[in-house]
Amino acid sequence: MASALKSIDDITKLVPPPVNDGGGYRPSQDEPFMSPQQQDYFRALLQAWKEAILREAQGTISQLQSDSLREADLTDRASSETDWSIELRTRDRQRKLIAKIDAAIRRIDDGEYGYCEVTGEPISIARLEARPIATMTVEAQERHERQEKVSRED
């Protein structure tokens, strides 16, 4: 079970893996926004992220099938069940993340990727590299979060 705990710590970070495209290409502000090369870069980033999540999920399935909760001690059993509960919650979060990754890839295909869904302005390259599934500029996201906070307090 220790390996499951280690993998939980690793996967809860939910950040995309770095893309190794062989050529060392990184988008820059000096080139046209969402050029075909930038689109290919972000598509590869998103696909690599999705593949990493799916590999982790397969590892969880394998571990669930091979391990069983047969601990004789009730405390040990409760601890194992808690560990698996955390693991399964993480998998559920990642299942939702995969849907967002797929939506981002569709936006690339439709030519809408990289533009704020609220203002229509380009989302900064730095933000897209940090959060490739972003759909809003930082400013629009902050406004959205402030409005959510106000509506929750009402």
Image (cartoon, rainbow, N blue to C red):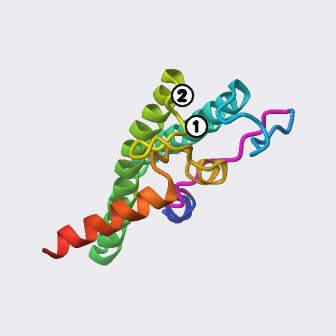
Crowd around label 1: few <14 · some 14–19 · many ≥20 (10 Å): many
- Mark whose residue sits in front, 2 or 1: 2
Residue 20 at x, y percent in the picture: 78, 38
Q: Which residues are magenta?
A: 11-22
The amino acid on which the numbered mark 2 sits, given as a three-letter code, is Ile
* Residue 46 numbered tag: 1
Tell me which numbered mark, 2 or 1, is placed earlier along the sequence.
1
Q: Nearer the viewer, residue 125 or 18?
A: 125
Quadrant of res 146:
bottom left
Work out which quarter of the rendered image holds the C terminus and state it. Answer: bottom left
**Predominant SS of the magenta segment:** loop
Does dot 1 land on a helix, a strand or a loop?
helix
Where 86 falls versus 25 (above or below)?
below
Mark 2 lies on residue: 108
Crowd around label 2: few <14 · some 14–19 · many ≥20 (10 Å): some
In the rendered structure, the answer to whether residue 106 lies left or right of residue 127 reads left
Residue 42 at x, y percent in the picture: 63, 36
**Residue at screen point 52% across, 34% down:** 113
Does dot 2 land on a helix, a strand or a loop?
helix
The amino acid on which the numbered mark 1 sits, given as a three-letter code, is Leu
Count how many numbered circles sit on residues in the image.
2
Residue 143 visible in image: yes
Residue 149 at x, y percent in the picture: 27, 71
Q: Nearer the viewer, residue 14 or 8?
A: 14
